[in-house]
Image (cartoon, helix red, strand yellow):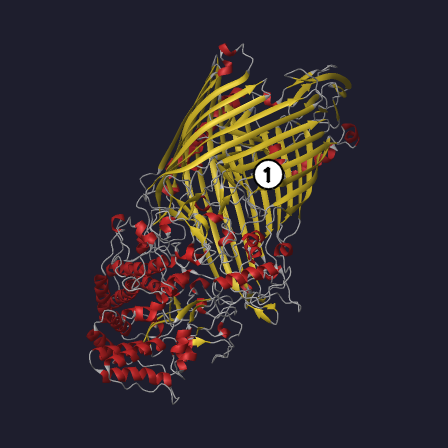
Amino acid sequence: MKTYMNIKLQKWCVVGVLSTLVLASSCKKSFLDVDPQGQQAAQQFWKTQDDATKAVNAIYGNLRTWENLAFPAIAIESTGSDEADKGSTPVDATFFNLYDTFTVTSTEGSLQSFWTGQYRNINLCNQVLDNVPSISMDESLKSRYLAEAKFVRAYSYFRLVRAYGGVPLRLKVPADASEYNIPRADKAAVYAQIEKDLNEAAAALPASYGASDLGRATKGAALGMHAKVAMYQQKWSDVLSLTNQVISMGYSLFPDFEKGFRTQNENNVESLFEVQCEYYPTNLDASNSQYSQVQGVAGEPAGGWGFNTPSQALIDGFETGDPRRDATILFPGETTPQGDFIKTNIVNIGYNQKSYVPFSMFIAGNQGSQQNFRALRFADVLLMNAEAANELGNPSLALTSLNKVRARARGTLSGILPDVVTTDKALLRSAIYNERKVELALENDRYFDVIRQGRGVEVFGVKGWKANKNEVWPIPQTEIELSGGLLTQNPGY
Amino acid sequence: MKRIFTRISVLAAFCLLTINVAFAQNITIKGKVTDGGDKTSLPGVTIVIKGAQGGTQTDADGNYSISAPADATLVFNFVGYTAQEQVVANRTTINVALASSTQQLEQVVVVGYGTQRKIDVTGSVASVKGEDISKQPSTNPISGLQGKVAGVSISNNATPGSSPQITIRGTGTIYGNTGPLYVVDGVWYDDITFLNPADIASINILKDASSQSIYGIRAANGVVLVTTVKGKTGNATINYNGTVGVQSVTNAVEMTNASEYATVVNEAYAINGSSPLFTNTNLGEGTDWYDQALRNAIITNHQLSINGATEKSSYNFSLGYVDQDGIIKTNNYKRYTARLSNDFQVKKDLKIGYNVTGSSSISKNAPASIYRALYTAAPVLSVFNADGSYGDPTKVPVGNGTVDLGNGSNVNPQATLDFNNSRTSKYRITGNVYAELKFAKHFTFKTSAGGDFGQEENTNYTPKYKATTAQNANISTLSIGRVETRNWILENTLTYDNKWNDHSLTVLAGQTAQRYKSYTTTGTAQNVPYQSEGDLYLRLGNADGRKIEDSGSLNTATSYFGRVNYGFKNKYLLNASLRADAASQFFGGSDLWGYFPSVGAGWVITNEDFMKDQKIFSNLKLRGSWGKVGNAGVPINPTTLTVDQSAGLIAFYNGIANTGASVTSIVPSALFWERSAGTDIGLEMGFFNNKLSIEADYYSKKTEQAIFNIPILGSLGTSNSLLLGNQADFRNRGFELSATWSDKTDGGLTYSISGNIGINNNKVLNVTSGSNPIDAGGNGLNNAVVPTRTVVGQPIGSFFGYEVTGIIQTAQEAATSGLSGAKPGDFKYADLNGDGTIDQRDKTFLGNPNPKYTYGVNTNFAYKNFDLTLDIQGVADVDVYNANLGNRLGNENYTKEFYDNRWTGAGSTNTYPSANLAGGNNNQTNSFYVESGAYIRLRNIQLGYNLPQKLTSKWKIQKLRVFANAQNAVNLFGYRGFTPEVGGVPTSAGIDLNVYPMFATYNIGVNLTF
């Protein structure tokens, strides 16, 4: 009996072993073949029109990032100027001072953040430009999508070339590791590519969109951006013709300068391109713009961190009675048109009002995430038009465009901001420069504007700006190291 | 009593128990108990009748007398000796020689998929008895291992309920799970916080690659084998252990008071060209935020176990309860554990059984970053204003007006505590069922199915409130996160075991399949009311903004393994094994299967004929081994490019959200198994009848093709600028020594003293990015300060920064310092490349966060009814980055030590900077912030007293011991923070930011056995 039992058990055991082995081997393939969990494989993407739509949405969404709108952008595009100070408390984020005093070296973190931030935009554009053409979809929509991608790519390269000079020119997604490391293209080649992209974008983009697409890049945005790019290269006749095209498209100046910057007047008649930002309760991670927060009133729940504050030079730079002074700067002790009292014990002389979101709109920790960044507006186009006309010897056109800007600022008030009348080229140029300074103050335009005017030493020299060095910032050191030395440093750094 | 236990057993209803009750005539037995080695008499030996109450002890001469049934079994027990059983069998004189525990050449250790005599092991396996762990006043069993095993470095995380970090012979892997594999009764785990330390019979740590390699796929960081308590032969034994204690902060860091703070802040303002923040600096003491938020916290611990066995079955049932207050007010952790195991010998050759553990814990969490908040909070800030409102950092009343302290010191920690409502509940049921069949004399087949089912729930509620400018919410938010894990493991092993003539042979073959799945959902809603806990439902919140997100992971693996152990004349030992693993992570690639071989050999020299007559060595064994282990801890489908659909890609047109998705990453074209190959050479020695035993090991383990992220060009535009891959080779090499002396004196003192030391050197041998570093450790530090660097020739995650050569004393020195914007009082950095400018190129290696030396001294003393345990433990030659000091945004508080030593003008000091600690280049990674992390501490001291048997037997108690202990009572270190025990993941280890203050625990307790 015992033996029998043992044999029986042995049989049972052998069957057990065999069945487990068979089970394990027969279903080995399916057992180990596990799909990505909760993540779509890229192979399944780029198949439908919907995929193309999402990929283009991603380009716009990404423009809200910290690198595009907050500290890195402020450090690179604003702090060096004479219009802005670091802000906040003296010991807070003191790295800004390195930009303010032109003592920054290649290892400073914002150099890398801004660089990478722009290339993230560019990657998203390249993804669309590489993959959407092969998708079977509405052809006219496809060509518009490609044009939108080209616009943002050009915008991003423009920000790069202003900041660093020639940069690696990536026009497609790298196919493999051999395409990862590429050298800097020269500045002219980068500008040429930007203009090519903007030409192609302008040709395919619509002049306007229906309500459900409001905020996408338009033909006017592409032309206006192109004008600015041309202006940075002193291609005055291009600037003139491009701005004339924009002027003929029906843009106008928003009547109330101050109100034009409030959220309810976003994407108004003056707007060529804005980075669209929202407070989005359904997904707070999409309420990620810190553009307004980092510049908001410090020590105020609905305010912010108090950086990029107006300088005394900016405050003094406005003509007497210019309403834009009060519309650009939140002064301590003032009450805003929206009824917010700016407290008096603030640590700074004032804050940027163009990024200001009224305190009543503050919701649980989201300081000003609703505020769009005005990337390009019609006033800028008019001033570019004026400058090009003046440079090309057409002062009357220059005066017409310039005085439109002044007239809007003047509004219904009298005795202030009289029309400029001089036809002297140098004096008129100076007047246009000055108008740009006050009209576009604290919109991250001033710093590179002065440099392209060739007045770096004249305006920023007292702060330490040096010719033949500070026209551009250094290439980020980490990037040079990761390139194994393929990338070269800018002179003087 | 017996009937009650029977009833309990029946009520337990899981087991078929038969309680054998002996009815026999009592006789009186006398005898003497002696030491098996030196034959001296042993006083104080406990003698009990197995399965009955009562017992006696030997007198001063080792004699005893006991009345027991003629067929009873006597059990002789003594600390430091192996228990011995004697069947009375009508004898009236029974003399017993007890073997000292260390004399146990027959000592058995647990190895992968089996057990071996310690003498037969060819690798390095450390064994720690359960009682040595449960004696430690730690709620986590791993924490109790600290200082006990050479080469095992443990870094405690003092947050109640958290797991300590354990590193076996240096950092084994960088990416993914960097902890060891835990195997509890055959089931695999990543951590064992769910285990009650009292349920552990032994912990065996596989330290060398050859011992580990049988666990191939998951062995790269070592393997910890946990065996739980089983029922022992005899009638039910009931054990109760209870402790109550208090935890108290030690080695606190003193911060400045209000006057000092105002003074130093004004100095910082002046240095930055601003007018003083405080017009009057005479502000008195102000608020001591640590006093305000910390407390002496109570901890209680109750454990009850019942175990026993009959001929056909054994059982063990235990309950555990821990209630631990955190030292931060409002923080509390409770853990309940229940464990049941049963074995049934259902047929002569067939045994079946199961282990099951149920565990639940509830934690009222301390607010995230509260410790950093306490460190930074300004002493000039009142907890409450006179009107009862919270002191607001933006409106600190000073003189006639108020000041705004600005960023960095903008929260009132009391408000943070008061409005924090965060709870974590964990529920887990885990265990295995198994069957073991012996057949054909030498074969054993075992099959086991294990499961681990867990659920974790995190609830976080922020009410609508307004405390201060920075601490408020104009709408309430509820978030509920839930993590579910469903894991299983199947194992089949077949063992052949035979001894003939001079040969012994064990052959093992096995197969396993495993599946690990986790699923996480997180829901949030706003405007949820809160009258009671019953209101905490997402559905009560606003429909607008209610959101649910989920994510998950799934891994599978299938494996085959085999091992041969051969011994000849107990002198020559050979061991070889091979494991083959296929992991889903590598499916579809060219490297699906990983193969992990090992070989080992041992020579027991004392068993040679020529050693017969020598008297020096009682044991001498030389062993050597080599093995390979793997790491599959990579994300699933690492080479599959996926679509990024994060919220940041949502586009808004006219204010309406539109889903965005695109590709924002780069994946490696191929990924291979990470493999490590290690060699171990060991020498085991026993002297003076094994009173002294010494074990020494040399090891070298090389991790090849280590998987981790390396930084890639920012111009590639990927979302994280990292690329995963097989990026580096590195090596851990070291030496371990442990020695134990156990003896007893003529006066009746039994004692053992053991010491261990591990020396480990970690070095990166090769990185695919060449000379380009792998930066990490920037998390949480401002200005993108990255204090660590992993680069060829240095240890993983070395601190990297500027070498401080002094303090700039004058404006003239500042001008020539090479630092842009330098001011007097700033750090002076070494210009290592001599180009006259200080920048990244002047950075150098400043320290190593991987401890080079870990050591422990563990002692046990027993004299009559008293016992004393004293454990000392420490680490040396290790560095900590004191990021708390320099990680500043503005007007954070300063330490008193900094205040007293700061630079205040030319010539004041050449070591401490000015108040402008965060300004300019001062907050860059530099040698000022790198400090020695060496420490030595009295880890545990415990004094116990066994109540005399005469007394306890009256109360029908077998054993009653009372004790008092203290953990971390004395800590010696030079570090300027709370504790140098910082931990952290390999590439950013040793960075001290927001560390839980260290505390000492003082307990009193009782052990009760019926």
For the point 54% across and 24% down, which residue is it?
A: B694
Farthest residue in the bottom direction? A414
Q: Quadrant of residue A274?
A: bottom left
Percent x, y of residue A70 = 40, 64
Which quadrant would the C terminus of chain B be assigned to in this image? Answer: top right
Q: Is residue A68 left or right of residue B37?
A: left
Viewer-closest of A71 and B973: B973
Viewer-closest of B928 and A326: B928
| Letter of the chain that mark 1 sits on in the rendering | B
Viewer-closest of B953 and B466: B466
Amino acid type, residue under disc 1 in the picture: Arg
How many numbered badges does the structure rendering display?
Answer: 1
Residue position for label 1:
B937
**Above/below status of A200 relative to B557:** below
Question: Which secondary structure, mark 1?
Answer: strand
Q: Is residue B144 left or right of residue A450?
A: right
Q: Quadrant of residue B720?
A: bottom left
Viewer-closest of B363 and A405: A405
Percent x, y of residue B93 = 73, 14
Q: Quadrant of residue A381?
A: bottom left
Percent x, y of residue B468 = 57, 66
Percent x, y of residue B1006 = 71, 37
**Above/below status of B539 relative to A339:** above
